[in-house]
Amino acid sequence: MTAPRLRALRVGGMLLAVGVLLAACGGDQDELQQWMEQQKREVKPNVEPLSAPKKFNPQPYVAMGAVEPFSTQKLTVALKQEARQPNSLLAAEINRRKEPLEAYPVDSMAMVGSLTRNGQPYALLKVDKLLYQVKPGDYLGQNYGKITKISETNVAYREIVQDAAGEWIERNSALQLQEKAQ
């Protein structure tokens, strides 16, 4: 016998064996059907009925005449109240003339150098690709920051900020020298 013919006989034998096995599995299923019918009769479903929906009672909106929380009217009332109770820290800062570096947030500033002229220390701050020369007593940042001390490596300043309770407090911080300011 040749190899292709032998292969065909093997495949045919396998198909015959699979067919015989499948035929053996397809026996009488009457017993299975009877058992399924018996189980359906014995089992009673236990479904709880749905509760009736609760009655909805609409409530009238009574805050229509009140001041909106984000209105300009409420803001002006709060500003007037703040003006009547001036904070000693903030009172002097509000009435003075603003300096150029107060238009920028401190986060956008970088100290790039320092120098001393006639015994007075100066720092070089880079903001928006511009270089500014500052000395102690100058103002910077948007929180009424005032430079208190300049060293070779940092610019110390104090800011006036609101705490969680809304009170104005002083906070000390510093700008560190940036070796490679961009």
Image: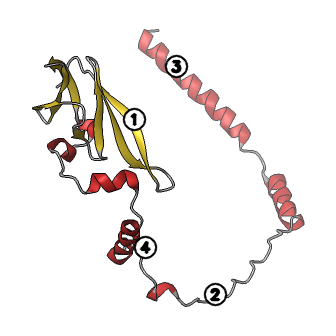
What residue lies at 27% left-to-right and 38% top-to-bottom? 106
Mark 1 residue type: Asn
Nearest-to-viewer mark from 4 and 1: 1
Q: Secondary structure at mark 1?
A: strand
Residue at image mark 1: 172
Mark 3 residue type: Leu
Residue at image mark 2: 56
Q: Which mark is residue 9?
A: 3
3 or 2: tag closer to the N-terminus: 3
Q: Secondary structure at mark 4?
A: loop
Instruction: Give the spatial CA distance, label 3 vs label 2.
Output: 79 Å
What residue lies at 41% left-to-right and 78% top-to-bottom? 68
Nearest-to-viewer mark from 3 and 2: 2
Determine crowd level at label 2: few under 14, some 14-19, many 20+ residues with C-alpha closer than 10 A.
few
Proximity of marks 3 and 4: CB atoms separated by less than 8 Å: no
Q: Is residue 89 above or below residue 118?
A: below
4 or 1: tag closer to the N-terminus: 4
Determine crowd level at label 1: few under 14, some 14-19, many 20+ residues with C-alpha closer than 10 A.
few
Residue at image mark 4: 69
